Image (cartoon, helix red, strand yellow):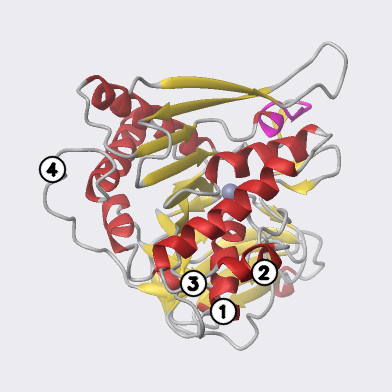
């Protein structure tokens, strides 16, 4: 089946302008497994678009050889709204300037109304139950209407992704090592993704509290299983992962080619593309709980001075950074120490050098859940 390019209009928010999504579709619609990949819903996270560019090149070649065996959808620019937001020369890609907030938070609840829609149709056949659940989700999305372009963006991306077996939402962090987020339900099932991408950390959660795009689709299955699992078999039918392609400045053609190949081999392992991906790379880490990640936040305003680098292993109590108050009258008292509350790996750092209270400074992947990490587990 020939590749298709689809353009989906997001409508016009201002006379004379109109944005659209561009979608690369491979394989037969309805073929299984179905993989959905999107890049840069946080529009200033360019490494994800670079990886998508290289993946598309490889998939185009595979398609010519007739090697697409499942269905694949790639959206190389998931957020044309954020891509165009520029204020005085600075790209603002994380939150909508019109006031819609963080582009990857507060997505509509895909569990909403599902209980009533599927309750009388569930039975003893697990595959049939998955089909029933997807049919109900699809019907709801088909009936949903959106006016503003950000709402349309969410709806159209949901419509492309909701029935996929694999959803990869491609991002990057600020300064960071390669890492992924996935669900407790899909771990260790997603080890091949972690291994192929060379992830140095895998953060596991069931509900991170952020209502992010791919988690909302996963949670629909998870919540139905909690609700009906003792009566009917309800598989977690989708592997969802937020894939963090390192830091914002890690944008290089050769690195993107490396990442595109890694995604391609992952799709081969999942039998969505034909061909031998070769031996599985060695895993570089274990999965660790997202609520065990020490998200250190600046206690006060000042100049940020690090005492650790990415990839350092630290112990509880180690000095991670100091905040320096440039206005201190006594420079001997200008420094405020920030010490780790976990043993673990330094996965990310903040690239800003002047920080305000509450701003995230670093993320340390610890193995044990931390008592203070409850509720919303993601950064803003
Ligand atoms: Zn992001």
Secondary structure under tag 1 reads helix
Question: Is 87 colored magenta in this rendering?
Answer: yes
Magenta segment range? 81-88
Q: Residues within 10 Å of mark 2 (few under 14, many from 20)?
A: some
5 or 28, which lies in front?
28
Picture residue at 80% right of the left edge, 66% below the top: 328
In the rendered image of this protein, does residue 173 appear above or below residue 282? above
Residue extending furthest bottom? 371
Picture residue at 51% right of the left edge, 51% below the top: 175
In the rendered image of this protein, does residue 97 appear above or below residue 9? below
Closer to viewer: mark 3 or mark 1: 3
Picture residue at 37% right of the left edge, 71% below the top: 187
Q: Mark 3 and mark 1: span between their CA atoms? A: 10 Å
2 or 89, which lies in front?
2
- Whether label 3 touches label 1, CB < 8 Å: no
Q: Which residue is mark 3?
A: 123
Question: Is 105 colored magenta in this rendering?
Answer: no
- Whether label 3 touches label 4, CB < 8 Å: no
Q: Quadrant of residue 189?
A: bottom left
In the rendered image of this protein, does residue 89 appear above or below residue 220? above
Q: Which residue is mark 4?
A: 276
Q: Quadrant of residue 50?
A: top left
Note whether ligand 1 is within 8 Å of mark 3: no
Image side of residue 1 versus residue 271, left or right? right
Secondary structure under tag 4 reads loop
First-in-chain label (3 vs 4): 3
First-in-chain label (2 vs 3): 2
First-in-chain label (4 vs 2): 2
Q: Which residue is mark 1?
A: 228
Q: Mark 3 and mark 4: span between their CA atoms? A: 37 Å
Q: Mark 2 and mark 1: span between their CA atoms? A: 9 Å
């Amino acid at each position: 089946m020939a590749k298709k390019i689809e353009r989906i209009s997001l409508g016009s928010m201002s006379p004379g302008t109109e944005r659209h999504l561009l979608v690369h579709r491979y394989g037969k619609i309805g073929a299984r497994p179905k993989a959905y990949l999107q890049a840069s819903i946080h529009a200033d996270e360019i490494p994800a678009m670079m990886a998508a560019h290289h993946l598309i090149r490889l998939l185009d070649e595979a398609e010519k050889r007739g090697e697409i065996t499942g269905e694949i959808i790639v959206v190389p620019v998931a957020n044309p709204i954020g891509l165009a937001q520029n204020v005085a020369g600075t790209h603002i890609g994380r939150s909508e300037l019109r006031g819609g907030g963080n582009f990857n938070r507060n997505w509509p609840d895909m569990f909403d109304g599902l209980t009533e829609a599927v309750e009388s149709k569930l039975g003893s056949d697990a595959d049939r139950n998955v089909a029933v659940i997807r049919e109900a989700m699809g019907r709801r999305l088909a009936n949903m209407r959106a006016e503003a372009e950000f709402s349309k963006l969410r709806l159209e991306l949901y419509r492309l992704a909701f029935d996929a077996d694999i959803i990869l939402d491609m991002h990057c962090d600020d300064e960071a090592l390669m890492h992924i987020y996935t669900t407790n339900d899909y771990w260790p099932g997603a080890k091949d993704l972690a291994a192929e991408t060379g992830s140095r950390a895998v953060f596991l959660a069931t509900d991170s509290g952020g209502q992010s795009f791919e988690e909302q689709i996963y949670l629909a299955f998870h919540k139905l299983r909690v609700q009906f699992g003792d009566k009917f078999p309800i598989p977690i039918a989708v592997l969802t992962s937020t894939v963090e392609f390192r830091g914002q400045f890690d944008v290089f053609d050769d690195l993107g080619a490396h990442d595109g190949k890694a995604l391609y081999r992952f799709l081969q392992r999942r039998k969505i593309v034909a061909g031998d991906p070769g031996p599985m790379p060695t895993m570089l880490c274990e999965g660790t709980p997202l609520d065990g990640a020490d998200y250190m936040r600046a206690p006060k305003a000042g100049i940020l001075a690090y005492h650790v680098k990415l990839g350092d292993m630290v112990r509880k109590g180690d000095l991670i950074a100091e905040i320096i108050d440039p206005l201190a009258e006594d420079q001997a008292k200008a420094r405020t120490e920030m010490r780790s509350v976990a043993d673990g790996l330094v996965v990310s750092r903040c690239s800003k050098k002047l920080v305000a209270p509450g701003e995230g400074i670093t993320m340390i992947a610890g193995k044990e859940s931390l008592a203070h990490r409850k509720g919303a587990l993601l950064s803003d």
